[in-house]
Image: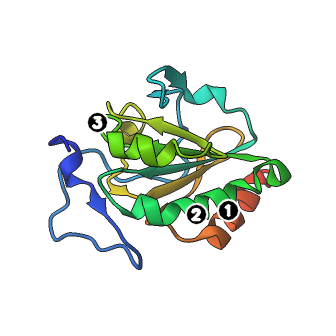
Amino acid sequence: MDVRAAWLLCLTAGPVAVAAEEPAGPPPPRLGVTVGNATLVDMAQRPRHLAEFTAPVLVLNFWAFWCDTWKKQLPQLVELSRRQDELGFQLVTISVDGQWSDAARRYLGVAPLPFAVRLDGRRALSGPLGIRRVPTVLVLDRERRVTWLHEAYPGNPAVLRAIRAAQRPQR
C-alpha cells in the first residue's frame, strides 16, 4: 500500500467511525458533484474510460484488495448486479490499490463477474471525488451527478433504493 492510500480506512461493518484527526487531502465525497470521464485500468491492464458505461444510472463501488471487506462484499455485489438489466444501471467496482495483486487476480479470475472491475491506482477518479474510506458506494444519475453516497457497504436494499431514486426526474 502506498503512502497516499495508507490513510484510507477499511470498514468492516456498522456505523462509520471518524478518526479524531482526519487525514489531509481532498474534502469528503459530496452529493451533487458531477463525475468526469476518468481513465481507469481493467484486469488486462488496458486503459478504460468511465464514459464507456452508458446505463442511465451508475453504481460505483470503491474498494481495496488489501482490505478484506471486498471478499465479504463480493456475494452481495454479484446479487445486486443481477438486477442491472431490469433496473437500468451498471455496477462498476473500482479498486484504489496501486496495482493489481496476484491474489486479487486469482480470486477474481475464477469465474467471470457480472460487473466491471477497474483499478484507480493513480487516484484519477477517487482523488477528485474525495474517496477517503473503503468501501464507499456512489450512485450517479443520468447526468453523472452523485445522488447518493455511503461510506461502508450499506447492503443491497439501501443501494437499490438509491438506484430507484436516481432514476426519477430531478425537480
Are there few (<14), some (14-19), or many (20+) residues within 10 Å of tag 2?
Answer: few
Viewer-side residue, 161 vs 46: 46
Give x and y (percent) for residue 83: 77, 56
Amino acid type, residue under disc 1 in the picture: Glu
Disc on res. 18: none
Residue at numbered disc 2 = 75
Mark 2–mark 1 distance (CA, rounded to whole Å):
6 Å
Residue 147 visible in the current orientation: yes
Q: Secondary structure at mark 3?
A: loop
Q: Secondary structure at mark 2?
A: helix
Q: Residue at left 62%, top 27%? A: 51
Viewer-side residue, 7 vs 170: 7
Give x and y (percent) for residue 112: 62, 42
What is the residue that sits farthest to the right in this orientation? 86
Are there few (<14), some (14-19), or many (20+) residues within 10 Å of tag 1?
Answer: few
Q: Are marks 2 and 1 in contact (CB under 8 Å)?
A: yes
Vertically, is 102 above or below 43?
Answer: below
Residue 151 visible in the current orientation: no
Whichever of labels 3 and 2 marks the residue nearer the N terminus, that label is 2
Q: How many numbered discs, if any?
A: 3
Viewer-side residue, 154 vs 68: 68
Q: Residue at left 20%, top 69%? A: 19
Mark 3–mark 1 distance (CA, rounded to whole Å):
27 Å
Amino acid type, residue under disc 2 in the picture: Pro
Give x and y (percent) for residue 170: 75, 51
Residue at numbered disc 1 = 79
Q: Quadrant of residue 142?
A: top right
Residue at numbered disc 3 = 98
From the viewer's perspective, is the residue at label 3 or at label 2 nearer? 2
What is the residue that sits farthest to the top in this orientation? 46
Amino acid type, residue under disc 3 in the picture: Gly
